[in-house]
Amino acid sequence: MIKKFLFAVKMFFIVGKKSQTFLDAKWIRLLLKSTPQKYKKTAALNILALSPHYFFGERDDRKSFLIREYKRNLRTRQLLFEYIVSRHVTPQSVVMDYGCGPGFLAKIVAGKAKKVYALDISDGVLLCAKTINHKDNLHYLNVFKNEAARIDDNSVDLIYSFAVLQHVSENLIAGIFDLFYAKLKLNGKVLIQVQLIADGWKTEMEWKKDQTITGKLKYKYGLHAFSNSVSFYSDKLERSKLKFLSMVELKDVLPFPFDDIYNQQLISAQKLPIDANGNFVNEELSSVDHQNPVSSSGSRLDD
């Protein structure tokens, strides 16, 4: 109980004014902006270590811990790119990373694409990302500040989102999918990692039902981790005029459990033409994409 209380106190000091905006506290933003350039990367890594969902493991030696976790993030995001994202990216692609965090995957994608927009809800995290994972064709934007409006409608080829939607309240999902629809080109694709209802995972309603002191503190200051059904996501996608294509188990795609999303799921969707009756027109839909939106070997497949 005491340990959980102290964790909640720490979260209180690092969260911004809006829910789940970890590392968005004003003091964090001021610290990063005022740190001399030669110390910014070290400062950014230390700040990321305060968050509950970027750096993990034993912290006996601070410097070794930060180096190890930096390398782990880089390595795991490289694997996500190779096994999932790479087949959907060309040198002409415009890509959106929704929930980019420190930007490790966004920077890798930016090395292969024309342009990447990396979106998050925390200015503190985005400042860390700009410090650690800068690239000229990589643009970091804050969703809560409506900076996504800088992205032209109908301009994005691919939108992906990993380790994000399970942390988002149900009432916000529709707005996220509406944004995806607005920014995607016709026939543009969506890849979203989700957590389906399973043992050890609670729904948002179950989180809210826990009215103990610990439960209230966890909901207010902790990292949300909600599960949901396939039908929930497919319905929300199609209400936003995005065609639900398929869902695959990530353990059937990834080579080994290098990340906790290994036991979770990947949904693919697409912005297709809609006829006068409101039905999707599927002539541009690739049967390969519908059946297997990712490469189980990590090798690039032609669209």
Image (spheres, rainbow, N blue to C red):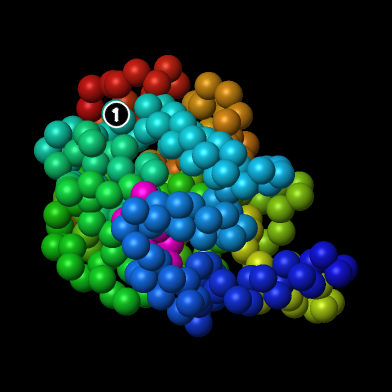
Which residue lies under the disc numbered 1? 87
Q: Nearer the viewer, residue 296 or 125?
A: 125
On whether residue 130 falls in the magenta region, the answer is yes
- The kind of residue tagged 1 is Arg
Q: Residue at x 39, y 44 (%)?
A: 104
- Image quadrant for the N terminus? bottom right
- Image quadrant for the C terminus? top left
Above or below, comparing residue 31 to residue 293 in the picture? below
The range drawn in magenta is: 124-132
Residue 169 in percent (x, y) is at: 54, 69
- 151 left or right of 104? left
Q: Residue furthest right?
A: 1
Residue 100 in percent (x, y) is at: 39, 53
Residue 79 in percent (x, y) is at: 44, 29
Q: Is residue 214 visible?
A: yes
On whether residue 88 falls in the magenta region, the answer is no
Q: Residue at x 43, y 71 (%)?
A: 31
Q: Residue at x 71, y 59 (%)?
A: 202
Q: Is residue 159 visible?
A: no
Name the dominant secondary structure of the magenta segment. Answer: helix
Secondary structure under the numbered disc 1 in the rendered image: helix
